[in-house]
């Protein structure tokens, strides 16, 4: 197994650098062994760590070492930088060293020279007459014949620092991004739900009304029918729109082919709520044949427990809604035991409420199209939550197709 | 064909009420005929319009009339309101009249009485002793025996007004919402693209790098291969990441099964750009076998013209990028003739640039996960653009599956 | 008063064109008189309107007419277009006609010629040999000597159309933008609040916890103290964080100069809620000297009624919170009479709940940094709401400085 | 100086726990000394750190220790938990221990007992008959007489773990929030700009057009006039709208009192661009008296260098715009030396371009109302950037008032 020794120095604990480096190594499927660790005793002492990094093949190791240097981890070694001339204007040698924006040093003739103008994503051009000078040069400005640093030997960077002392600003971490490959994320979530079931743990789903508005109702119903959902938390709006879409979809002849809730009808949800109130409960309305399809229907048919917590914006509300919010949460608490995964779908209010009562060990996926909603859950203390910024309608559709392909 | 006469009065032109009413009628698949039209001659004169509304069946007509009244269109007629008693506490008669938040009047014994406390989504409870009084009451507070207005006769509402005179505020219209049934929208766009092709018009696709980051590259490549795309506008980032995902996906053995761009590798795009610069152009790199897959590859193979406009944030850039932005747009202009549909995918800069040069008649769909981006295009003058707030990765995947099901 | 006759033709009602035109006229402080109105009787008939437009001075009228033509309103007249030669490459004559992206016609020698390639923000260049041709040309491409249309005579555009028939898409209107001059909006809201008070109407303020988190607590407290607020709706979080900031700001010696809530202290709000529960109510805690500052303190001192509606995410909750949401809204209803303006500050849940119970005539301003929240209120039926996308902390600070300058 | 010994154990490096703990200590103005450090040598070995924490007074230390325990840092000690009875239903003893959602242990009679149902923000209720049991109980459910854990002795929590191995998800860190006290942030930025000037370093400002649209133009002009800005990067849009607001503000008599750009006038910017093209440059137009106010005017008058980089969406463009984007960035590079602080105001394109060329040591503040824009800069490699999600109009206004109070 190919291995290399790297070292990193500075305020690498509190600046998160060491954590990031270990993360990159493990994330790349590689391995590390700490050879030497000196942690600064106080806030002002620097730390220094020397690591042996091992990867499965040389190519992976090279790619990984390059990534590590972005964060200040340098190869341990005392070799000079390798220089190669450019053969064409505006084109670099294939193995060119790609710069970071950190203070950088290049070893030439056994001595370390600073790079004059650090800039990321450039090449390092070396001139030696009258004295050695190393400059960053963007790709389009190199000239045939100029000598460029290639490979990873003989280049060191200083680890990035962040300002010391108390600050009202926090580190800008952008880990919740909408620019991720989404079908891979859906596949990953599907795998986690399968693993959760194999471990004998339960799946809790928390839903907002947008699940229905975006057309994902039938897909979620299919997941309930196929036995994937063990308990469901939601509010009056989710349940009312689910019932409305299904009751009026059938009785008024709205096209089932379109797979969408009935458009318009500002009072449709009120009429359905009113009829369910007449039946006395959602279960009674299902048993009595008034409701014949949808998420709530499947919950009743499969015996999946649900808690509908009330809110001040509720119309009606449905007879099953716990209008006393303290009692609602107390009831939610009774369903939390044994939950291994919580899936929060386009819900802010009920997702935060659920996050409040879940132990830290529950894997939590928070799916919403609005990045602010996704970060709010973590702000409120549910630090184990993983955010997926995407369209909940397309997400649930894809998830159902993966978990219940029939 | 069942029909009813409705009328609406007030500042119905400038408050957009008449437009909304006609929109609702046509949107419901119904029909109208203007029986009487009196448009106010000045800013202060009210207008009055009487319409005959026709629908295919009675149920649709009833639902539509209810919708119209939310906007101030009242049934023409001189019948009293029909009252029905509640049989249970907290449950309304099935046909109850659902209120709007507009000033409302109820006809009892031939006389119109105002509703005391207008509130939306309530029932109208009538008491007659000592004198007739009509109040809004929320569903949960009605008491068995109370008499409630049902049906649509004998109820009038005043049309909503908006404040007159100049104002720095604008009407709050929320037509670009993420809470729409998404798979229906994808199906609709697919249908528009098919119709566009049948009319012999061309499809222009404008792409941002998030198309690649969200994993939609292979799906878009499939659409190009299947002949759906006639011209492509993008920037250096889109093309570089498309090439990077494909070149390094092949050469470094990254799992093609995952269908995702290579993670990490902060310099990967630089290395690929550098090699394409060595080839001299994307076309040369494709012909020479360096690039074997992806969106740009398919464009070259299918002879689909593309314009890559430069920007100040470009690395490299690729040799095909027009670094002079004025020349870039001049070149884009040469490809606009015959375009019937423009699809803007997760692009702000190039979408606005394209919107600038398209005639108003080109159907334009702007897909982005960020609502602010979607509205920006309309702000910049491309008022024909229709916004779809969704995840571009899942959108393109679904669109490709519909247009090229093989 | 200078005046001109314009006309517009097409589906100008349902495509919102006429409404937009009237809006522009009134918004510019100008005036109109409808000279001739022919409204299409059915969905397929076009309409045609001829308007006399009057403005205070010629400059304003010219600017307004230019604006109107963007929406398809053309000057009535039978004059040829005026052509002027360019004197320099890349520079247009000062009075050049700036194009829209609509189909456009230019009158030359008494005949109307179509513009070959409609594009917005260009000039119209006319060549006459061998036959008259009119093309759009971007500013940078005109050549000295080319003849360009200037002024507004002899140019007509077709009114924009939107697709007929039912569609799942809606018009993309972007009226809620964050790109507005904000201090002007604050001044305007301040003026409306003053006018509301002069009319003897009450101000309702609805608050989310971000009012406190963004540091606006002391500013809102100042508005309460100065008598501007007549009733306040909020939830447990807003009140708890207001009390926490003030109680612990005093007792633990946190810098009052910073004007900010205490950082950290994940259990601080719990401890304060617990002590208020011991006192029995917020009022008791104020009377007993436990709470000495802040929004809730000022409400108690000034006798401003408040309703705290419960939600499932509440910690504690405070003893004043109505945990039964149906009872909470019933109590809110009792405070709605006489309200002329509602100010929704960084609240989704309570803003929607309040929107549900307000009559349409109440002026409603919804302030939030998140555009999606601002549009949600209108989606939920509160169409009278005006959205202001801004930072609530800086907004309230500026508003307080204007309304209570002392 | 009061001090306590705490320890934390687990995967505390790669789970960011140790970094977070050190951050909290320093952020609270306290101090630490590492007494014992054992770092796991490999990915699977746990680490263990023992720290002495010192604060200025006992109250601060208690608050800090409570905060640290949320992250798994426990007091070192072998004392039993202190129990206190509740005196009222629903009210806890004042010093109650507030729970986290981590696995928790309580020491009773010399033995550690696990908490049965971990839940955050609850109390720990202990019953001892028949055997000791510790449960979390929410505040509202405790009953008078129940014994509750108080203080910080005798409670331990397990440090949170995050899943090992490669994952497509990343940690959900929500450090860029719009819920921060904004006027404090403005004050902090003002302080940093003062410190930067005292160190003899330059301030670079990067502007998007929203600076002008939101009414901040005059405030930014004032900062330039007062000598705060050393170099300015922007695009055609920013400069054009700044010039338009000022030129037409003067010549057409638009109210200067309103302090806002002229509304409407879709071709106003084109006309101003055209006239500046006639002058040949912005400087010539200023010297010739055509431009008499605004940001660009002040830059010319004060000799502040500016670079206007072109983009494909530009109208005109202004003669000063570098239409070749590669040349534009090369020119930007020449102004970067000596820059100590970069202020990115409502700009995405130019902010990313500037981030690309700045060394890591430049303090960078990115101000935008859109959280996605703020995180994009960090995504693109400018990890030193600090994000401020706020309204740029109100931010610049407040900043100018602080830096140039005259």
Image (tube, coloured by chain):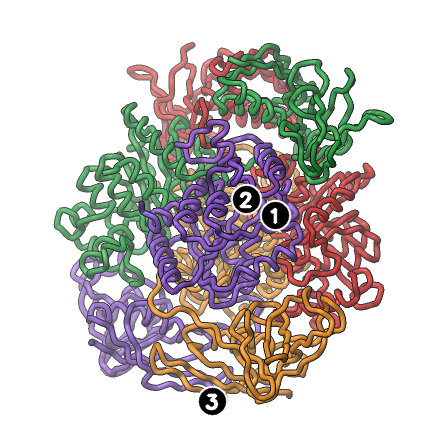
Chain colours: A red, B orange, C purple, D green
Q: Earlier in the sequence, mark 2 or mark 1?
A: 2
Would residue C140 appear left or right of C222 to someone viewing this image? left
Residue B363 location, x and y as percent?
Answer: 48, 66
Chain under callout 1 = C
- Residue in the foreground of this view, choosing between A399 and B345: A399
Q: Circle 2 sits in a helix, a strand or a loop, which is it? A: helix
Badge 2 crowding class, 10 Å Cα cut-off, few under 14, some 14 to 19, many 20 or more, is many
Helix, strand or loop at mark 3? strand
> Dot 3 corresponds to which residue?
B36
* Residue A156 visible, this orientation: yes
Relative placement, left or right, of B126 versus D113 is left
Measure the C-alpha gap from mark 2 to mark 3: 60 Å
Name above or below for residue A241 compared with residue C253.
below
**Which chain is disc 3 placed on?**
B
Q: Which residue is mark 1?
A: C321
Work out whether residue A61 can be spotted.
Answer: no
Is D406 above or below relative to A313?
Answer: above
Q: Quadrant of residue B6?
A: bottom right
Question: What residue did someone put label 2 on?
Answer: C283
Where residue C183 is drawn, which disc sits there?
none
For label 1, the crowd category at 10 Å Cα-Cα, with few meaning under 14, some 14 to 19 and many 20 or more, is many
Q: Residue at x 57, y 84 (%)?
A: B75
Task: Give the quadrant of residue D145.
Answer: top right
User: A90 above or below B224?
Assistant: above
């Amino acid at each position: 197994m190919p291995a290399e020794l790297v070292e990193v120095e500075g305020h690498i604990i509190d600046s998160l650098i060491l954590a990031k480096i270990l993360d990159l190594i493990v994330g790349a499927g590689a391995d590390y062994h700490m050879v030497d660790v000196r942690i600064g005793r106080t806030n002002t002492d620097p730390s220094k760590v020397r690591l042996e990094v091992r990867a499965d093949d040389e190519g992976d190791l090279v790619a990984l070492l390059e990534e590590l240097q972005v964060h200040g981890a340098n190869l341990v070694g005392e070799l000079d930088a390798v220089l190669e001339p450019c053969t064409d204007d505006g084109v670099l040698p294939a193995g060119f060293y790609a710069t970071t924006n950190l203070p950088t040093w290049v070893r030439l003739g056994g001595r370390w020279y600073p790079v004059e103008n650090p800039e990321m994503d450039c090449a390092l051009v070396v001139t030696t007459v009258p004295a050695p000078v190393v400059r960053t040069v963007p790709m389009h400005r190199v000239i045939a014949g100029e000598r460029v640093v290639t490979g990873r030997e003989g280049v060191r960077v200083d680890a990035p620092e962040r300002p010391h002392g108390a600050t009202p600003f926090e580190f800008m971490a952008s880990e919740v991004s909408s620019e991720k490959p989404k079908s891979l994320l859906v596949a990953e979530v599907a795998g986690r739900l399968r693993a959760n079931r194999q471990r004998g743990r339960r799946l809790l789903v928390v839903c907002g009304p947008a699940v229905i508005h975006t057309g994902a109702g039938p897909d979620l119903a299919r997941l309930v029918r196929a036995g994937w959902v063990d308990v469901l938390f939601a509010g009056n709006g989710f349940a009312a729109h689910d019932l409305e879409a299904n009751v009026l979809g059938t009785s008024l002849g709205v096209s089932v082919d379109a797979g969408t809730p009935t458009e318009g009808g500002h009072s449709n949800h009120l009429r359905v709520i009113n009829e369910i109130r007449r039946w006395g409960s959602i279960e009674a309305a299902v048993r009595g044949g008034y409701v014949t399809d949808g998420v709530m229907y499947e919950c009743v048919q499969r015996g999946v427990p649900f808690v509908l917590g009330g809110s001040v914006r509720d119309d009606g509300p449905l007879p099953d809604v716990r209008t006393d919010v303290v009692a609602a949460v107390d009831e939610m608490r009774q369903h939390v035991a044994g939950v291994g995964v919580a899936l929060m779908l386009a819900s802010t209010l009920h997702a935060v409420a659920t996050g409040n009562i879940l132990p830290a060990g529950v894997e939590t996926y928070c799916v919403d199209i609005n990045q602010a909603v996704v970060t709010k859950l973590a702000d409120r203390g549910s630090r184990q939550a993983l955010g997926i910024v995407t369209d909940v309608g397309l997400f649930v559709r894809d998830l159902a197709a993966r978990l219940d392909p029939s």
